[in-house]
Image (cartoon, rainbow, N blue to C red):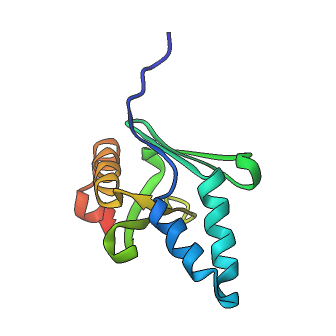
Amino acid sequence: MGIRETTYYEGGPHIGDLIINILLGFTVIFLPLTIGAIVRAIWLRYKITDRRISVTGGWMGRDRTDIVYGEVSKIVKIPRGIGLWGDVVVVLNDKSRLELRAMPKFREICDYMSERVAAKTGRSLEAITSN
């Protein structure tokens, strides 16, 4: 019998990211951003549990990255779309980064992940999270 895992959030990027980028796509300059938003909306999926952070993405959703909270050294949240969604950057102990772009409920998800990292590593929340 395996260890149970409780899912906190599972889903894709915020729909507002797609809407804004489609509106900007009517200008040729922002067309690459629009294409990126469409690809994210179709194939990017996040899964945040009490044990790990999982990101499935890439072309046709073929790439998957799993990170356990013990590997995380810092979490940075960046508001986007007038604060309705945001980007969350997870910095690992080896200084590599995982970006969770256009994350809905990013403040709550960032707080949840920070609490899991603090519980796993014994570090304070202030040492883990920054804006």
Q: Residue furthest top?
A: 1
Residue at left offset 35%, top offset 50% = 113
Q: Is residue 94 above or below residue 81?
A: above
Q: Is residue 37 above or below residue 27?
A: above
Residue at left offset 59%, top offset 57% = 41
Examine the image and state in which quarter residue 76 appears. bottom left
Residue at left offset 44%, top offset 59% = 103
Q: Is residue 116 above or below residue 123?
A: above
> Front-most of 119 and 7?
7
Q: In the image, residue 37 lies at what x, y percent?
A: 61, 67
**Res 81 seen here:** yes
Residue at left offset 62%, top offset 60% = 40
**Res 131 seen here:** no
Q: In the image, residue 63 lies at what x, y percent?
A: 71, 48
Q: Is residue 22 left or right of residue 73?
A: right
Q: Quadrant of the C terminus?
A: bottom left
Q: Is residue 121 left or right of residue 43?
A: left
Q: In the image, residue 34 lies at what x, y percent?
A: 64, 74
Q: In the image, residue 56 lies at what x, y percent?
A: 62, 47
Q: Is residue 84 left or right of residue 96?
A: left
